[in-house]
Image: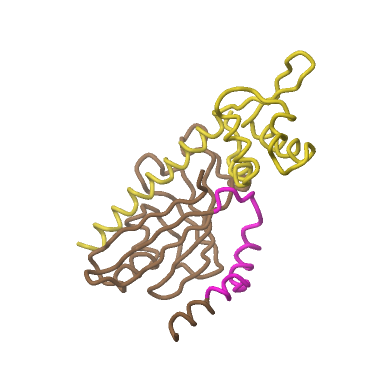
C-alpha cells in the first residue's frame, strides 16, 4: 500500500494567478475554507480555523516549509484523529506529520498543478525542529538542486 | 477504539513484512518455520518482523496444539486504506474549489 497521495490538475489560469491563490493567506483561505491568522512564511507556523460547514471546530495548524515563487509551496501538518465534533481533539501531537507539496508548471493552456501528500508512516515528531531541518536545505534537497541545475545546463 | 495510523503505515513500509503479509493474507495461518522456509532470512529475523506486524494488529498469534501460528487480520489495513481514501477525497474537493477560484 502506498503512503502517498498524488493529484494532477490542469488549471486554465496563468502560473502567477495560481501562485497567488496558493500563497496569499486570504486567497488560500477562500478555496481551502480556512480562516488564517496571517501570511504564510517559510519556517513559520500558520494557524487558523476551518470554515468548511460542519467542521468549524477543527483547528488548522501547519508549518510552512518552502515557498519557491511560482514553483513550489509546501507545508507539513498533522491530521486530527477524528474530524467528527464528538471525538475531535485539538491535540495533534500524537498524529503523524505529513508533507503537502503544491508544485506548479506552465502549460500551453495555463498551469499544471501537482499536489502530493506524503509521509503517513512518519511518527510524530517535533514540528518546529522539523521545520528548521527542512529549511536548513538538507542534503537531499541540495542533490535535487544540483540535478535540476545540471538538467537545465546540459 | 481507532488504532494510531502512523505505526501501521510504518509497519507496511518494509519489503520483508509485505512479503509475509502476501503469504498470510490468503487466510491460512502459518508457523514461523513455514514462513522462514524459502526465505534468505533467519528464523529470528522473521520473528522480529512478525512481532512488528502483531504490534499493530495486522497479524495475531494463535496456538494450535504446541505450535504457535500466525494469522492475518485484514482490519487495520482496511481502516488505513479507508482513511487514505478519505484524505484523497478531501483533496479532490479542495482542488476543484481551487480550480473554480482561479478560473473565474
The answer to if B103 sits in the magenta stretch is no
On the image, which quarter does residue A29 sit in? bottom left
Depth check: A11 or B59 in front? B59
Residue range corresponding to the magenta coloring: A119-144
Image x and y of residue A51, in percent: 38, 49
The residue located at (37%, 39%) in the rendering is: A54
The residue located at (45%, 74%) in the rendering is: A68
Up-down relation of residue B43 to residue A29 (above or below): above
Depth check: B62 or A28 in front? B62
Image x and y of residue B22, in percent: 57, 35
Image x and y of residue A122, in percent: 61, 51
**Colour displayed for chain B in the image of the structure:** yellow
Up-down relation of residue B104 to residue A71 (above or below): above
On the image, which quarter does residue B65 sit in? top right
Up-down relation of residue B96 to residue B59 (above or below): below
The residue located at (58%, 71%) in the rendering is: A135
Q: Which chain is brown?
A: A
Amino acid at each position: 500500500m502506498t503512503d502517498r497521495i498524488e493529484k494532477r490538475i490542469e488549471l486554465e489560469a496563468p502560473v502567477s494567478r495560481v501562485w497567488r491563490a496558493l500563497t496569499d493567506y486570504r486567497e488560500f483561505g477562500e478555496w481551502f475554507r480556512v480562516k488564517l491568522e496571517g501570511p504564510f512564511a517559510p519556517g513559520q507556523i500558520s494557524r487558523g480555523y476551518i470554515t468548511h460547514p460542519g467542521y468549524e471546530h477543527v483547528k488548522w495548524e501547519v508549518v510552512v516549509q518552502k515557498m519557491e515563487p511560482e514553483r513550489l509551496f509546501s507545508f507539513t501538518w498533522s491530521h486530527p484523529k477524528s474530524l467528527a465534533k464528538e471525538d475531535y481533539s485539538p491535540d495533534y501531537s500524537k498524529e503523524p506529520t505529513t508533507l503537502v507539496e503544491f508544485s506548479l508548471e506552465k502549460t500551453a493552456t495555463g498551469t499544471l498543478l501537482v499536489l502530493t501528500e506524503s509521509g503517513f508512516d512518519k511518527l510524530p515528531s517535533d514540528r518546529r525542529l522539523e521545520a528548521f531541518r527542512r529549511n536548513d536545505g538538507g542534503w537531499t534537497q541540495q542533490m535535487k538542486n544540483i540535478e535540476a541545475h545540471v538538467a537545465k545546463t546540459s | 477504539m481507532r488504532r494510531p495510523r502512523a505505526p501501521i503505515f510504518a509497519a507496511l513500509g518494509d519489503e520483508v513484512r509485505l512479503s509475509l503479509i502476501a503469504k498470510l493474507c490468503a487466510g491460512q495461518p502459518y508457523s514461523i518455520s513455514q514462513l522462514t522456509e524459502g526465505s534468505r532470512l533467519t528464523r529470528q529475523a522473521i520473528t522480529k518482523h512478525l512481532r512488528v506486524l502483531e504490534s499493530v494488529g495486522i497479524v495475531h498469534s494463535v496456538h494450535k496444539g504446541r505450535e504457535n501460528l500466525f494469522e492475518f487480520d485484514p482490519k487495520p489495513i482496511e481502516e488505513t486504506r479507508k482513511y487514505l481514501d478519505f484524505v484523497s477525497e478531501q483533496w479532490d474537493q479542495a482542488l476543484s474549489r481551487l480550480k473554480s477560484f482561479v478560473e473565474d
